[in-house]
């Protein structure tokens, strides 16, 4: 395993989209094309419902490991103007549609959604729902910070339909918490987890990270023991993405030398995975684990598991609209990203402009390769046809796969591959075999994190 880790630990995408953001071709993209693709997605699947992601970018303090797009402030006066801007952006999208959109999924991410007061979050959700209709099988979820989520936040969001919450835990060791500037005692996580359960949330998730500065296998073991004591329904067990060249000073609070090596990191993952499996969790796609009763695992079993900019989700909607600063939308035919500055975002939407600044419209080759990458990421296997071999360069894909096969990471039949048990930790590398854009042109900068 050590040699495999060394061999396959290369920069690579996490495939929350295909093509990945550095390969979006802006020259085939325009606001007009984007709006048409939104309309097309909406009209083709009127009954399916849409997903909405709302990015709430503010945090009171900076966690040094953080890769999210955020703004650090203690000034809570920013809440109302920002919510008004998000509601205005939503109004601009609804104006494109001929009937009220059915809202199936809604996720609040950040930043820290619980930076906002319960009243303001309720105002935001009620404003969104006013222009749409709730689907009968809604899936509303949010990311809660264990240090500032209150009973009132949980209650207010429960009242407007939220049943799933995910708390960022990372690691319980104090040295690691100091290095990442996120001091968060177990008692805080226990308290918010119990509140959520008592209020009626049916899925409580915890995020854990391995590969953090000063973290070792004992820390991961202790963190998983404590996590298991609270038995969250879902656990995201992420690899720390060290990309300080992309994320500015936030990740420069420690040296590379303070990070575990790739081999130590892999050992942390293997140990964590073994413990989670022993505690009854099922492995769902890359870095996600769930109890057998949780929707995410049931989706894996029934083949409906999907992956998008929000990560893994139990079902797919054709249209996902990302509202708020830096959010990415996905119309299935194209992607678009919003501007990243709060001031520019608020200014554009106030002037009636959908605030996108870049995007990509998918070619037929992109659509085909996306299908295979999604199959690998969500089902650990994929099958292609003879016709598809005429559209994309499968000779190159076969070449890319041959080494993965020799290393026992995939089994290849004539027109299909299956990821082996040994290959599961390398699912990003296996997906890269189908990423023809990546093989045609290496990215200019160290844009991706390491795959291991
Ligand atoms: S990890 Fe979360 S709370 Fe910490 S800075 Fe990043 S977005 Fe903010």
Image: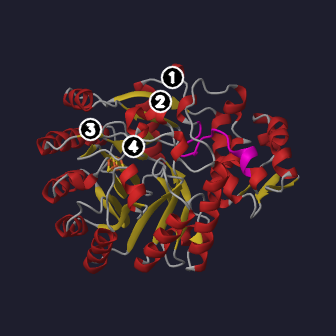
Mark 2 closeness class: few <14, some 14–19, many ≥20 residues within 10 Å? many
Task: Kindly identify which numbered label has been placed on residue 336.
Answer: none
Are the two marked residues, 1 and 2, in contact with CB atoms closer than 8 angstroms? yes
- Which residue is at 40% across, 50% downward? 179
Q: Is residue 58 left or right of residue 320?
A: left
Q: CA distance from mark 1 to mark 2?
A: 6 Å
User: What is the quadrant of residue 354 in the picture?
Assistant: top left
Q: CA distance from mark 2 to mark 4?
A: 19 Å
Q: CA distance from mark 3 to mark 2?
A: 17 Å
Q: In the displayed structure, would residue 395 be above or below residue 223?
A: above
Identify the residue under disc 3. Answer: 89
Residue 216 point in image, percent of width and height: 54, 60
Q: Earlier in the sequence, mark 3 or mark 2?
A: 3
Q: Is mark 4 within 8 Å of ligand 1?
A: yes
Task: Kindly identify which numbered label has been placed on residue 359.
Answer: 2
Residue farthest toward the top in the current orientation of the protein: 27
Identify the residue under disc 1. Answer: 26
- Which residue is at 74% across, 42% downward? 433
Mark 1 closeness class: few <14, some 14–19, many ≥20 residues within 10 Å? few
């Amino acid at each position: 395993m050590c040699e495999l880790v060394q061999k396959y630990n290369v920069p690579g995408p996490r495939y929350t989209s295909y093509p990945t953001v550095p390969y979006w071709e802006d020259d085939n993209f325009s606001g007009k094309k984007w709006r048409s693709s939104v309309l097309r997605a909406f009209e083709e699947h009127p009954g399916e419902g849409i997903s909405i992601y709302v990015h709430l970018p503010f945090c009171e303090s900076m966690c040094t490991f953080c890769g999210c797009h955020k703004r650090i402030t203690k000034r809570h006066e920013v809440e109302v103007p920002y919510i008004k801007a998000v509601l205005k952006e939503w109004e601009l999208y609804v104006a494109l549609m001929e009937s009220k959109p059915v809202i199936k999924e809604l996720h609040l991410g950040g930043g820290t959604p619980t930076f906002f007061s319960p009243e303001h979050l309720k105002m935001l959700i009620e404003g969104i729902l006013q222009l749409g209709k709730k689907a009968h099988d809604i899936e509303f979820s949010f990311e809660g910070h264990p240090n500032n989520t209150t009973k009132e936040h949980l209650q207010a969001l429960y009242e407007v339909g939220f049943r799933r919450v995910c708390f960022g835990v990372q690691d319980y060791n104090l040295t690691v918490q100091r290095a990442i500037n996120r001091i968060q005692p177990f008692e805080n996580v226990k308290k918010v987890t119990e509140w959520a359960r008592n209020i009626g949330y049916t899925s409580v998730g915890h995020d854990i990270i391995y590969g953090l500065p000063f973290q070792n296998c004992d820390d991961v073991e202790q963190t998983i023991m404590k996590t298991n004591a609270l038995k969250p329904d879902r656990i995201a067990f992420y690899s720390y993405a060290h990309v300080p060249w992309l994320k500015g000073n936030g990740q420069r609070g420690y040296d590379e030398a303070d990070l575990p090596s790739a081999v130590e990191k892999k050992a942390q993952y293997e140990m964590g995975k073994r413990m989670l499996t022993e505690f009854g969790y099922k492995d769902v796609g890359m870095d996600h684990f769930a109890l057998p009763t949780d929707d995410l695992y049931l989706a894996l079993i029934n083949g409906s598991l999907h992956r998008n900019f929000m990560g893994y989700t139990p079902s797919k909607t054709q249209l996902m609209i990302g509202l708020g600063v830096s959010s990415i939308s996905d119309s299935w035919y194209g992607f678009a990203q919003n501007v990243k500055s709060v001031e520019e975002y608020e200014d554009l939407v106030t002037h009636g402009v959908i605030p996108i600044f870049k995007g990509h419209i998918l070619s037929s080759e992109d659509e085909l390769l996306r299908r295979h990458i999604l199959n690998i990421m969500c089902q650990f296997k994929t099958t292609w046809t003879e016709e598809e071999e005429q559209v994309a360069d499968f000779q190159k894909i076969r070449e890319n796969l041959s080494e993965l096969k020799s290393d026992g990471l995939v089994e290849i039949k004539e027109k299909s591959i299956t990821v082996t048990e040994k290959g599961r930790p390398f699912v990003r590398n296996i997906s890269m075999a189908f990423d023809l854009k990546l093989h045609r042109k290496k990215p200019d900068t160290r844009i991706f994190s390491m795959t291991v």
